[in-house]
Amino acid sequence: MTRIASLICLLAMPLLAQTYDFVGLVQDGERGEPIGGAELRTPDGKKLGTSQSTGRFEVQVNNRRAHVIFRKQGYKDLDVDLGELPELIDVEISMESSVQELAEVTAFTKRPAHDPNQAQSMEELEALQGMRIDLNDHLRQLHGVAGMNEFTNDISVNGSRTQDVTHYLGHSRIPSLRHLDFGFPGNQSVLNPRVLKSVTLSDNQAKGPVNQGNASALVYDLQDGDPEAIHGDFVYGSVDRELNLNGYWDGRTYLVSGRLLDDNSLGNLGSKFFTTPKDARIGQSGGCKDSTVTCAGLKDPLSFTSGDLFIGTFKRDSTGAFSRHSLVVLGDDFKVQEDVGATLEDAEARALVKGHQGAWLYSYESVTPSSSGDWEWGFSTLFRDYQDAFHDTMTTTNVPDWYQYGINSTNQVDYQLGDNKRTDWQAIWSVQYSPASKTFGAQPSYGV
């Protein structure tokens, strides 16, 4: 029995020798503050102990080369290999915080400056404004535009006076035409934005550079043709009807655009505002609401027709030679009539006001390059006829014969107050030569 007891004691001594004390302090690696509540675990998840509020810990391990995992919320897990430590007593353990602190960072970046002389494509302008039938809605988005008057072509660029801003279709100077200002959306630009490729804010060569606050010019560049296809779109809106075509044939681009405002829609809108109800005018207010009474009325108390047509063709070759023909035609007619019938059953039309605007614009431009320099010249001509007349509603009897201006005539205005009629005819011719050689280090241009 004595031998058996001695053997058991010898076998038990190595087992007691495999227990090691691991004692130390766990702290924040950045601030040096003690970390309380940190758990010490083995890699298989067995919990060995927890650090005190002072950061001190004391646990036992069975292997001198064991791994101990320190875990604490807000800190990254730390795997400590005891075999790499020279001592297991008074060990300092530093844990790294897992919280990412937000630091104030000031970054400077150069704001992209927009070159006023850089062309703005219609896609860029439409991204801000959307597709509009009035070109002025897009011009408002151009860099440097200081302002413009509503329903007019008056536009100010970088402080320049509105009368000093000129308009160019390519290289040809053109007047900026608008339809008559008679009800929405009649007052729109004659030049359809859908046929344009870009708009450029440029220097007016006759006035001075735009970046010095002097007069400037708006240059409209037309679309290029696609050699592979013919493009077109048809718009049928509540009022606007238009057809646009873009084609390419034998090295030449062809553009066609036609717009027409629906006169029925405009007439229905305007008839609600321009004329007085018939029953109220003859002193029988409410009479037209009686189902037993026949109340006659005018079919078209307000008529307004507005449309324009653009036809253009241009050609550009590999030498830089360029030529363009453009034709713009517009027509506006309006008439407001009142019913002067004396009874509810009778309807008699009399014009209160009527007007007409008809115009056509033709322009041609050409660029001819050569080894010595480039020749540019352009020509444009405009014919515009405008007329409006008003009726004197206060005078109906006892008037001299010379004052009476047609009775019951659909083409004239009874008792006309005035006939505002004028005809504009203008032609613009320009030529410019840009030599290839420089003068005093600059590239000169000479033009008329």
Image (cartoon, rainbow, N blue to C red):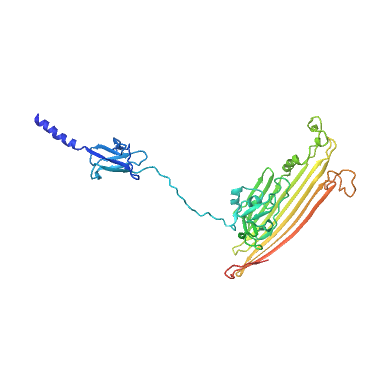
Q: Nearer the viewer, residue 111 or 55?
A: 55
Expressed as whole percent of the image width and height from the top left, the position of residue 239 reads: 69, 44
Q: Which of 239 and 350 is in front in this view?
A: 350
Decide if residue 80 is in sight here. yes
Count up the numbered dots: 0
Q: In which quarter of the image is residue 155?
A: bottom right
225 sits left or right of 175 in the view: left
Expressed as whole percent of the image width and height from the top left, the position of residue 361 reads: 72, 57
Residue at x-position 61% and y-position 55%: 144
304 sits left or right of 67 in the view: right
283 sits left or right of 224 in the view: right
Q: Which of 48 and 125 is in front in this view?
A: 48
Expressed as whole percent of the image width and height from the top left, the position of residue 115 reads: 57, 57
Q: Quadrant of the C terminus?
A: bottom right
Expressed as whole percent of the image width and height from the top left, the position of residue 162 reads: 68, 56
Q: In which quarter of the image is residue 208?
A: bottom right
Q: Quadrant of the N terminus?
A: top left
Q: Quadrant of residue 327?
A: bottom right
Decide if residue 245 is in sight here. no
